[in-house]
Amino acid sequence: MDAVSTVTVALLSSLIVTVSSVSFDTTRDLLNYLSQNNTKYIRPVLNQSNPVFIYVSINAYNLMDFDVAAGKLSLLSTFVFNWTDENKAWDASQFDNQDKVHLPKSSIWVPNVLIDNSADLKAILQNDNSPQEIEIHSSGKISFYTSVVFEVLCEPNIQKYPFDEHECEITFITDRSTSDVKLRAYDPIDTSLLKENAVWDISSSWFDHKLTRGLISSITFRLVLKRYSTFQVMNLVIPVMVLVALNLLVFVLPPSQGKGALISTCVIGVAWMFHKDADAKIPIILKSICGKRKASTGLQRIRIGMDGRVSPQDDLREDGDNEAGVNPWQTLARTIDKLFYFGFVLFAFVETLVILLLIIHFM
C-alpha cells in the first residue's frame, strides 16, 4: 500500500511539474515576439495623445535616522512602479500559458522618475545602481521593484519638544509634461513590515496628487514622525524639575544652620554637569528661536526647458547659506544657547552670594 501511494505521489508530482514548466524554446519565442514591437524611444500607448499612468507604491522597512537639526530623513524602502505597455501584451495560451517574463530594463521604454525633495535628486528607474530587469505580464502590465536607502529633506518643528511631531514628504516627479506621463498611487506608505525604531514612530501617512508649476505631474506621500517621549522625559524633564526643587530648598532652610550656601554650590555643580550631558540630547532649536528654516527641495533645484523637460540645477546652495555651507541661523542658535547658559550660571552665582551675605548678616 505504501509503495502504491509513493508511486501515485511521484506521478502526480511529475504531472504538476510538466504542466507548470515552460520550455526554453517557448520563452525564446516569446522574447522574439516581444522584440518585434520594440518601442524604447516611444511612449507605450497606441494613441500618442493619451498619457501613460505610472502607479507608485512604497513599502517601508526601516527608519534608519531622522536628523532633526538638519531636517533629513533616512528610510529603507522598496519602491514599486507599475505601468501598462500596450505594445507588450500577448496571448498566454499561445506560449504554454506563460503569463510573465523578465526583460532588461534598457530594452523598453521606462519613465524618468525622481524624488523631488531628495538630498541628491537622483533618478530612480534610469539609474545604473538600480535593478536592471523588469517584469512584464501578458496583459502588458510592467512592474519594477527596487530597494534603496534614500534621504529626503523635511521641515522640522520642535516647538513642542520632547512631545514633537514632524511631517515629512516624499514627492515623486517626472521630466515629462502631464500630457505625456501622470503619476498616481493606490495606497499610502505601507508600514506593516516597518522595524521598530528606538526614538521615532510613524504615526500616520497619506498621499495626494498635484501638478508642479502646471507642467509636470507629481505624487506626494506624507508621513508623520512622532517622538517616543518617555526617554526624553526621564532624562531631561524630571532632572530639571529636581534641580528647580533643590534650588528652592535653599529658601526653606533656616539661615542659622548655614547649609544654604553649600546646597546652592552643589546645585550649580550638578546643573553644569547636567547641561553638558543634556547638550547632546536636546536638538538645536532652529525653528522656535530663529524662525522657520526652509528645506531645500527639488522644486528649487530644477530647471524647466522650452520643451517642458526638467533637469537638475548644478548649484544646490540655499540663499541663506554662505560659501562654507554653514547656515547663519544655526550659528545664531548656538550663540543664544551659550548666552542662556552663562546667564544661568551668573544668576546662580549671584543668588548664592546673596544667600551667603544674608547668613553672615544674621550670624
Image: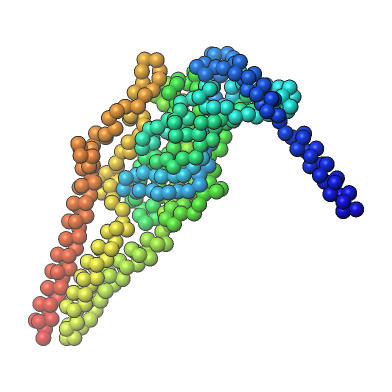
Residue 233, placed above or below residue 245: above
Evaluate whether residue 182 shows in this view.
no
* Rendering quarter of residue 53: top right
Left or right? Give the position of 157 relative to 63.
left
* Residue at the image point whose x is 29% and y is 41% from the top: 293
* Residue at the image point whose x is 40% and y is 20% from the top: 309
Pick the front one: 20 or 305: 20
Q: Position of residue 285 (x, y in %)?
A: 28, 50
- Identify the image's colour scheme: rainbow, by chain, secondary structure or one colour: rainbow
Pick the front one: 10 or 324: 10
Q: Quadrant of the C terminus?
A: bottom left
Count the numbered circles shown: 0
Residue 261, placed above or below residue 348: below
For this orientation, the residue located farthest to the right is 1
Left or right? Give the position of 234 relative to 94.
left
Pick the front one: 41 or 212: 41
Q: Position of residue 148 (x, y in %)?
A: 46, 40
* Rendering quarter of residue 278: bottom left
Left or right? Give the position of 62 relative to 307.
right
* Rendering quarter of residue 115: top left
Residue 249, placed above or below residue 194: below
Q: Position of residue 257 (x, y in %)?
A: 18, 86
Evaluate whether residue 126 shows in this view.
yes
* Residue at the image point whose x is 85% and y is 46% from the top: 7
* Residue at the image point whose x is 19% and y is 56% from the top: 338
Q: Position of residue 59 (x, y in %)?
A: 53, 42
